[in-house]
Structures are given as C-alpha cells and as structure tokens.
Image (cartoon, grey):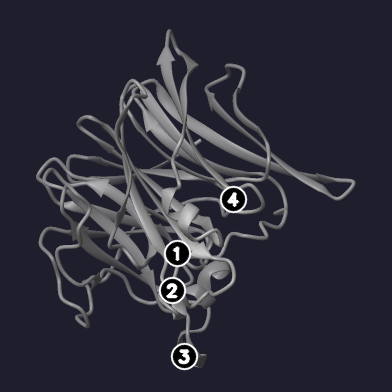
C-alpha cells in the first residue's frame, strides 16, 4: 500500500480511509512465495456508466488465473506459505463486507477453497464504521487476519480493530473479536510466541511531509500489544511493508524505499525503545518500480523475490 494515501491518517495515528475507493490507474499486484512458486494476486478495477467494480485473481506460473472476487470494489490483504494462500478482500463503500478466500496448490495449480464472510459485529452498533485496512499472517494452525475499521463521519473517532483466526482448511478457529490496536497497519507476522506487528507513524509538518517511519510492536497470541511501538526505520516515503521470521527467531522487516527501486530491510532480535534511532537499513535488492516482491529469508540472507 502506497504511503501517500495514508499520510493524513498517519498524522492522526489512524489507518487509511478507504471509503470512496477511487479507481486506481492500472491493476495492483501482490506476490507471495509458496512451495510451488510465486503466486500473484491481481486486483483490476473498472468503471462503466458510473458503476465501479473490481476483479481479483490469483495465478501460479502459466496456469489460468483463478478468479476469487468479481463485483464490488475491494482492496486486498494476502498471506501464504507451503501450499495455502489466504486472500482477504474488503469493501468500504455501501454494503461493506470483509471476505476471506482460501486457495490451495494441487498438482501445480491453484484450487479454490472455502470463502468466509467475516462478521462485523461492532459495525452493527456503529453503522458508520467501514473496513479501511487489513493484514494476514500465517501461523502454525493456519492464518490470523487483522481488520481495522474507521468511522465514515468522524475521522478522529477511535478505530475498531478485530482479530480472526482461520485454519489451513478454511475452518473458522476464532470469530472476529476486538483487540487494542489503534495504529496504522503495516505488516503482521507470527514470531513463535505471538506476533510482530509493523505500524506506520509520521506524515505531519513540512519536515516529514510525504514520509513515515515503520515501527514495530509485539503482540501476545491473543493480539494484545506488549509494549509501545519502537522505531524500526528512518523517515521515508516508503511502501510495500512486509515481515518474515528468520530461523533463529529474529524478525526481518522489509519495505520499498521512497525511490520505488530499492528494497530495504531491518533485522530485529529484541524489542527496541520509542525515540531510539534504529540501525541503518540494509538494501537487499533493486527492482522495477512496478514489480511486486515477496520478502524471504534463506539462512541469514534476505531475498526480495519478484515475478
């Protein structure tokens, strides 16, 4: 997600407002690495006769893309490993929804699995809430989904963040429940005991206009923050934030640099402190500005895989 669309929200400590959902120029693509290779999730938006729509597909190699969504405008969050991929599509306009689509690899091809409509119980009490951001993390039991909702009438109102757990076969392990995560979402990864969450902070005043820091915070297995977020990057007009766990337990944070070419990384072994400058980031790759990447680790080597 490009940082420029969330700067006002970052200044307020809130997630991006995804309500109007204007039609972007060209399709958006994300990739994740499964055992069978890179899977590309493509969202194509269209507008005809005043009606906006979106189509979401997943593709592996040269096989025909699998259609996961074809209808209302959506944004997506994805996560996957081994032979399973979860794509969460959320709509923040009229008749809002959050849907999780599971796909699996069978015989070198993607096969559609169950789709789940995630409950929005808090929205029943606050009808002006709309889904604005989402993250997916893979876990030993399947997937964890974090969804953040923002008030359409009052951007200064508290956001509502929920956590849902889904099994690798698509069964619901735990229905959405509210967790105390008020920050703008960046990335989520299982750390062996709970989660590391990357959040975005910045975007105010002339000095930091158009930029933000990535900060990290650990969450318990139940999604409770365990400390105040700490700085993990310098200010930059960054995007495409990702998190992966290394074999030794260290967490590797990656993002696309402001020039859209460099993929940067920061390794975190222990929680830091708010206000402490992090170690300089490492450039792990230079890629085309429009090329999606999947952050991976191979031993201590950090890799940005592209299509």
Q: Residue furthest top?
A: 107
- Seen at 53% across and 22% down, the residue is 61
State the SS at label 4: loop
Are discs 1 and 4 less than 8 Å apart at CB?
Answer: no
| 206 over 19 or under it: above or below | below
Compare marks 1 and 3 and give the one earlier in the sequence.
3
SS for callout 1 = loop
Residue underneath mark 3: 207
- Residue beneath the point at 40% across and 75% down: 13
Question: Circle 2 sits on which residue?
Answer: 236
Residue ranking furthest to the right:
49
Q: Is 84 left or right of 270, judged from the image as shown? A: right
Circle 4 residues within 10 Å: few <14, some 14–19, many ≥20: few
- Mark number displayed over residue 257: 1
**Structural distance between the alpha carbons of marks 1 and 3:** 18 Å
Q: CA distance from mark 2 to mark 4?
A: 18 Å
Question: Which comes before the other along the chain, label 1 or label 2?
Answer: 2
Q: Nearer the viewer, residue 220 or 118?
A: 118
Per the image, label 3 sits on a secondary structure element best described as helix
The residue positioned 43% from the left and 7% from the top of the image is: 107
Per the image, the residue denoted by label 4 is 290
Work out how far the residue at label 4 is from the one at label 3, CA to CA, in angstroms.
27 Å
């Amino acid at each position: 997600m490009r940082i420029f669309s969330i700067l006002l929200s970052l200044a307020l400590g809130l997630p991006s407002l995804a309500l109007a959902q204007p039609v972007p120029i060209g399709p958006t693509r994300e990739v994740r690495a499964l055992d069978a290779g890179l899977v590309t999730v493509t969202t194509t938006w269209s507008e005809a006769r005043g009606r906006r729509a979106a189509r979401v597909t997943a593709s592996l190699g040269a096989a025909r893309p699998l259609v996961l969504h074809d209808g209302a405008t959506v944004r997506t969050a994805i996560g996957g490993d081994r032979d399973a991929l979860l794509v969460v599509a959320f709509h923040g306009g009229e008749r809002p929804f959050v849907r999780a689509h599971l796909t699996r690899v069978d015989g070198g091809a993607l096969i559609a699995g169950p789709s789940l409509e995630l409950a929005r119980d808090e929205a029943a009490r606050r009808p002006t809430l709309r889904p604005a951001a989402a993250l997916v993390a893979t876990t030993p039991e399947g997937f964890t989904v974090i969804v953040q909702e923002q008030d359409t009438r009052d951007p200064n109102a508290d956001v509502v963040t929920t956590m849902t757990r889904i099994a690798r076969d698509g069964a619901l392990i735990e229905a959405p429940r509210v967790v105390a995560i008020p920050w703008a979402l960046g990335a989520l990864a299982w750390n062996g005991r709970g989660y590391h969450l990357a959040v975005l902070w910045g975007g105010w005043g002339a000095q930091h206009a158009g930029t933000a820091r990535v900060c990290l915070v650990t969450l318990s297995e139940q999604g409770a923050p365990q400390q105040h977020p700490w700085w993990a990057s310098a200010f930059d007009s960054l995007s495409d934030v990702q998190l992966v766990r290394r074999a030794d337990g260290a967490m590797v944070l990656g993002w696309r640099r402001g020039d859209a070419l460099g993929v940067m990384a920061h390794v975190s072994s222990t929680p830091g402190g708010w206000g402490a400058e992090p170690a300089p980031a490492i450039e792990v790759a230079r890629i085309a500005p429009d090329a999606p990447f999947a952050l991976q680790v191979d031993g201590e080597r950090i890799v940005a895989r592209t299509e």
